[in-house]
Image (spheres, grey):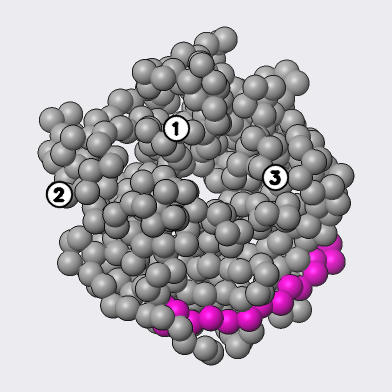
Amino acid sequence: MRISRRSFVVGSSGVAVLAATGSMARVIGSASPALARGHEPRFAGYGPLQDDPAGLLSLPRGFHYRVFSRQGDPLTRGGVVPASHDGMAAFSASVLGTWLVRNHELSAEDIEEDGLVPVEPVPGVTYDPEAVGGTTTLLVGHDRRLVRHGISLAGTSTNCAGGATPWGTWLTCEETDETVAKAHGYVFEVDPLRGGNPVPIKAMGRFEHEAVAFGRNGHAYLTEDASGPFGCFYRFRPTRPLRGRGSLHAGGSLAAMAVQGVDTDLSIVQEPGTVLGVRWVPVANADPGDEDTKVREQVVAAGATPIMKAEGVWTGLDGTIWFVSSRGDGPDAEDEEDRSAGLHAGQIWRYDPHAETMELVVLLPHGSPYDGPDNITAGPHGFALACSDGEDDQWLTAIDERGRVHEFAKNLLNDSEFAGATFSPDGQTLFANIQDPGLTLAIWGPWRRR
């Protein structure tokens, strides 16, 4: 292992965080060209969170929020808003405002046992009529008020996260490989204007997908949040890269990352600044049937590196790919299947596809109150924003260029996770979900304040 820059810093609540100095600046600068050119002062947080009389969301002074889409609200053309809001992306609707495409992480078990609201089948955009997950598309005006919303993809299952394509569509990922009436575990494409394509992109693999991001050359990088609980990190090389809507259906090759020097799972790496070489293990059968060997079992047997809770993934302006392992339960975990080589409350990794190296940039130590980073995005205001899915309190946290963690929002309503954080194209509104009871919020305020 080669050790590069490393610092020991303290988050805004006094929690120790380990970070590779300067590395976070690369992804933060990628979302803010002015910051990348060194024209902006360093982000230092927005100060302490303020009480919310409504008891829903605590934010820094000067920031405001509005809830504009709730589970059970009537949709524009019949039916109601489904439950379990999750991954989401924002797209420009020009003078009309912003399109949001939103996942609903629902399975048949959620409906039967918890009474949650399913995604109703809609003609033309339904894959499996017996499955209950899918996506909704929302048009939000420049005043941050809902204009209209409706179901854009149905008949999928456990739609957790996903990612925006370079051509302005949303890839929604199924975090399951179950079979309902049809096999699940796929990626589907949803156009904000035209709706969803109910044909799965099978070449991107059948496994417990989490999120996806694209490199400059059109390669897609996918995380796997397997319930095993170990998944892998994958690269999909399309046959027709960067060719627009529908092009991923032309096929491609899938491979999984093997990290050199790691002969166990990725949690063993505990020193931020550690840089390791990688290689790629081809997937022999990307679309296994129920009786076949699962994708992750194929590649781990061939040397791919297992990763506990591989979650959010996003792309820097320089073409590097960033992803999250939300926790490592350690060798002493109570349940044998949850035992990992190392103990941590979150890792942020940077993969350089040109150098074929991986760097551990941020490590949240065990015991951090901001444990379990899940969806993460790089905003245009000098910080990356993480949605926590931890054991206790749930936060939106801002991570600055030195890896320091600053509280930005706290869920005061319950212990349900934040999900789907995404900035509007003009950067002035942050949209985010509280998964249960299914709330979508717009957040705005003095973003430039330091």
Among the 4 quarters of the image, the one containing residue 201: top right
The label shown at residue 187 is: 3
Magenta span includes 276: yes
Residue 62 % position (x, y): 18, 35
Q: Is residue 206 above or below residue 277?
A: above
- State the CA–CA distance, disc 1 to disc 2: 26 Å
Q: Secondary structure at mark 2?
A: loop
Q: Nearer the viewer, residue 48 or 233?
A: 48
The residue segment tinted magenta is 271-294
Which is nearer the N-term, disc 2 or disc 3? Answer: 2
User: Which of the numbered marks, if any, corresponds to residue 283?
Assistant: none
192 or 105, which is in the foreground? 192
Q: Are marks 3 and 1 in contact (CB under 8 Å)?
A: no
Left or right of 410 on screen, residue 403: right
Answer above or below: position of 438 versus 30: above
Q: Position of residue 133 (x, y in %)?
A: 60, 35
Q: Residue at x 76, y 45 (%)?
A: 242
Residue labelled with disc 1: 426
Image vertical order of residue 129 relative to residue 278, above or below: above
Q: Nearer the viewer, mark 1 or mark 2?
A: 1
CA separation in Å, label 3 and label 1: 28 Å
Amino acid type indicated by mark 2: Pro
Can you identify the residue that label 2 sits on?
48
Nearest the viewer among 308 and 219 is: 219
- Say which amino acid is labelled 1: Asp
